[in-house]
Image (cartoon, helix red, strand yellow):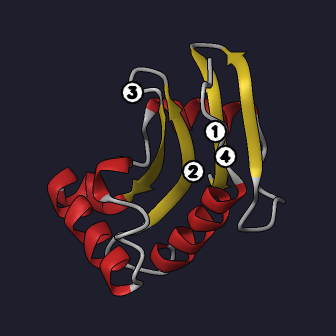
Amino acid sequence: MVTTTLVEANVKLGEEVYDAIKRDATLGVRAALWWYDVDASEWRYMVAAEDCARRGPRAAYLRVRNLLKRANLLDRLPLAKVVVVRPDDRTLATIKKMFDFSKTPRPMHFALENITIPGLHIEGAFLYDA
């Protein structure tokens, strides 16, 4: 169960982060969202990036770190709250299967809360791109 609400300030921060990373060809963003991590009892910013699949997670994290630092966002979103995954991540693939985002303008501002879809329970998520 989501114990901490994603506040409007974090929704706006997520949009700023998305704007800072989405056009970077090296990173290759395929999805960006806030994701409620039940185990940590906190919201994490998830980025699905081609760079993670191409050069590995370390390179992708370094790229995200550099982009956040360049945009003066690293102090507001520490790297410890960022999760970088491959574009074929199971969670994202399941969400994309269940919802058609093809006509949703970006940033999409699509919230999911306490829903179960085949193979996945989502406590909380707020999508900017998927």
What residue lies at 51% left-to-right and 73% top-to-bottom? 22
Q: Secondary structure at mark 1?
A: strand
- Looking at the picture, how far across and down is residue 62, in whole percent? 20, 66
Alpha-carbon distance for marks 1 and 2? Answer: 7 Å
What residue lies at 82% left-to-right and 59% top-to-bottom? 104
The mark nearer the N terminus, 4 or 2, is 2
The mark nearer the N terminus, 1 or 2, is 2
- The residue carrying mark 3 is 40
Query: Around disc 2, counting alpha carbons within 10 Å, would you say few (fewer than 14), some (14 to 19), or many (20 or more)?
Result: many
70 left or right, relative to 115:
left
- Looking at the picture, how far across and down is residue 9, in whole percent? 65, 61
- The residue carrying mark 4 is 126
Alpha-carbon distance for marks 4 and 3? Answer: 17 Å
The mark nearer the N terminus, 2 or 3, is 2
- The residue carrying mark 2 is 33
Q: Secondary structure at mark 3?
A: loop
Q: Amino acid at mark 2?
A: Leu
Labels 4 and 1 touching (C-beta < 8 A): yes
- The residue carrying mark 1 is 125
Labels 1 and 2 touching (C-beta < 8 A): yes
Alpha-carbon distance for marks 1 and 3? Answer: 15 Å
Q: Secondary structure at mark 2?
A: strand
